[in-house]
Image (cartoon, rainbow, N blue to C red):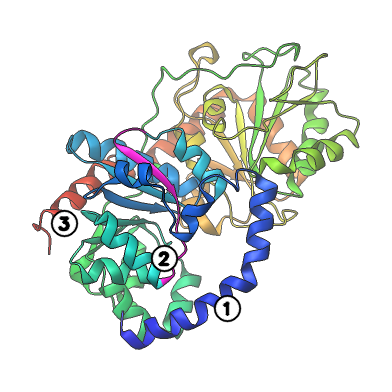
């Protein structure tokens, strides 16, 4: 990155941070865990943490929950390929940090992501002196990149993606964007289509590699533990389950209306809702009860059988995919306050419980707004691996059809496996490329 561009970035960063900081702090307070390692966000580490981190770790940065999942997959596989490797994982959001913390170990130190002030960043890079600096998907920090580059530390963007919209934005500042991206040692892409977009920005072809998407690489096993139902709920895991995954404000009511529309025909159907942000639990419960539905919270004991189970926990969603009959993936309906889609790949790859007599994966429904997962979402729909629904009426119709047709559900799962096949082994390929880059084999 040229010095002039970095100068203007730092000139604008501080006032922009001051403008955004109140809203960011409010979100942290609402989501909880904001005190966790708060000082680390400003480059403050106690002596014990500094001693544990030491030097020579691979520093990986992940913004939020999805990126943390990618990072943890990478760390697991890279550790198998390189048993002596140690890792430092920085995470921006409190929710992502909580999930990452559950996986911390002597080999993996988890920290809150430090603000990208030049002084903080240069000092930490020199103090930690990582053997490599990895960024997941798109969350690059210019001062961290420049500090690592100045010390000759390999800088790698893994699971890199570039949407059409982002490409248009970068084209407007191509004179700045191209030198910045070309300062990276390697960019490992997820999709073939993205290569031409990166090249159009002036990125050198020799640093671009294609490996597939870690998110779409199946690592789930059939032996995973099923979730525990709250006592008194009156459910069985053998009941048909509609799992509403990673929902956003506005979607829970649409999903509940769909559930009500099909419940008479399917009286044992259960609805499990996992909101993307669990701090919304109170407003969700209030809105659902306005429809005459009873709601149980995962964190509380249920005194009576309830219509809906609300997972107000963090990190439990993946354990519910194997027992779900149909999964709706949120942040995708027109009524949602946020749009762009959440990860629809995990339910497609989840291993279904043996008692349900079903192959690996679940049937998936998504709304029309899935730009964060394009072009894959469209490919899945075109292949018949996922169904798009626009509102409660369409969701109810698709749900009813799938509940009555197990053959159709299995056909969708097989179609999904075919679409996702090119991404199998992506984690191993990315780890091998990183090993080559850090050992100086890949130039």
Q: Residues within 10 Å of mark 3 (few under 14, many from 20)?
A: some
Marks 3 and 1, Cα distance to the nearest angstrom? Answer: 37 Å
Comparing 174 with 58, the one in front is 58
Q: Residues within 10 Å of mark 2 (few under 14, many from 20)?
A: many
Q: Are marks 3 and 1 in contact (CB under 8 Å)?
A: no
The residue positioned farthest toward the front in the image shown: 47
Measured as percent of width and height from the top left, residue 211 is found at 27, 51
In this view of the protein, can residue 1 be seen by the observer? yes
Report whether 138 appears left or right of 327. Answer: left
Magenta stretch bounds: 105-117
Q: Which residue is mark 3?
A: 437
According to the picture, the residue beneath numbered tag 2 turns out to be: 162
Task: Name the residue located 81 percent from the left edge and 42 percent from the top edge.
Answer: 283
267 relative position to 214: left or right: right
Disc 1 marks which residue?
A: 15
State which mark lies toward you, 2 or 3.
3
Q: Nearest the camera: 352 or 72?
A: 72
Instruction: Give the image location of residue 35, x and y in percent.
Output: 59, 47
The quarter of the picture where residue 313 lies is top right
Disc 2 from disc 3: Cα separation: 22 Å
Give the structural element (helix, strand or loop) at label 2. loop
Measuring from the top left, give residue 432's x and y in whole percent: 18, 46
The kind of secondary structure element at disc 1 is: helix
User: Which residue corresponds to the image point at 78% horizontal and 43% vertical from the top-left?
Assistant: 254
């Amino acid at each position: 990155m040229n010095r002039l561009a970095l100068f203007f970035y730092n000139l604008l960063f501080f006032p922009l941070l001051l403008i955004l900081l109140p809203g960011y702090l409010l979100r942290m307070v609402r989501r909880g865990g904001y005190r966790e390692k708060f000082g680390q966000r400003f480059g403050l580490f106690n002596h014990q943490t500094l001693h544990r981190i030491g030097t020579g770790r691979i520093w990986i940065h992940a913004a939020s929950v999805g990126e943390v999942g990618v990072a943890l997959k990478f760390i697991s596989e890279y550790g198998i390929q390189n048993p002596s490797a140690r890792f430092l994982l920085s995470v921006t959001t409190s929710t992502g940090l909580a999930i990452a913390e559950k996986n911390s170990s002597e080999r993996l130190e988890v920290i809150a992501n430090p603000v990208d002030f030049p002084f903080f960043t240069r000092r930490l890079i020199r103090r930690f002196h990582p053997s490599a600096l990895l960024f997941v998907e798109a969350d690059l920090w210019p001062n961290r990149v420049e500090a690592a580059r100045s010390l000759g530390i390999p800088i790698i963007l893994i699971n890199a993606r570039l949407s059409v919209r982002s490409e248009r934005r970068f084209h407007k500042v191509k004179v700045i964007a191209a030198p910045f991206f070309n300062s990276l040692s390697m960019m490992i892409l997820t999709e073939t289509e993205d290569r031409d977009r990166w090249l159009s920005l002036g990125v050198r072809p020799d640093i671009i590699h294609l490996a597939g998407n870690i998110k779409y690489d199946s690592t789930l096993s059939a032996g995973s533990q099923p979730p525990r139902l709250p006592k008194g709920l009156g459910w069985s895991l053998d009941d048909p389950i509609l799992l509403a995954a990673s929902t956003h404000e506005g979607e829970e009511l649409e999903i509940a209306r769909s559930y009500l529309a099909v419940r008479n025909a399917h009286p044992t159907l259960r609805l499990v809702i996992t909101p993307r942000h669990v701090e919304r639990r109170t407003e969700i419960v209030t809105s659902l009860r306005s429809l005459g539905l009873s709601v149980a919270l995962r964190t509380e004991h249920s005194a009576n059988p309830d219509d809906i189970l609300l997972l107000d926990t963090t990190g439990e969603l993946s354990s519910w995919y194997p027992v779900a009959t149909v999964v709706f993936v949120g942040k995708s309906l027109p009524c949602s306050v946020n749009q762009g889609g959440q990860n629809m790949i995990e339910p497609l790859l989840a291993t279904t419980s043996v008692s349900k007599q079903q192959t690996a994966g679940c049937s998936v429904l998504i709304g029309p707004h899935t730009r964060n997962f394009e072009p894959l979402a469209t490919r899945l729909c075109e292949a018949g691996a996922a169904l798009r629904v626009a509102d409660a009426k369409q969701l109810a119709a698709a749900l009813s059809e799938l509940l009555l047709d197990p053959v159709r559900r299995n056909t969708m799962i097989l179609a999904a496996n075919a679409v996702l096949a090119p991404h199998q082994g992506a984690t191993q390929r990315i780890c091998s490329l990183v090993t080559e880059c850090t050992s100086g084999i890949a130039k």
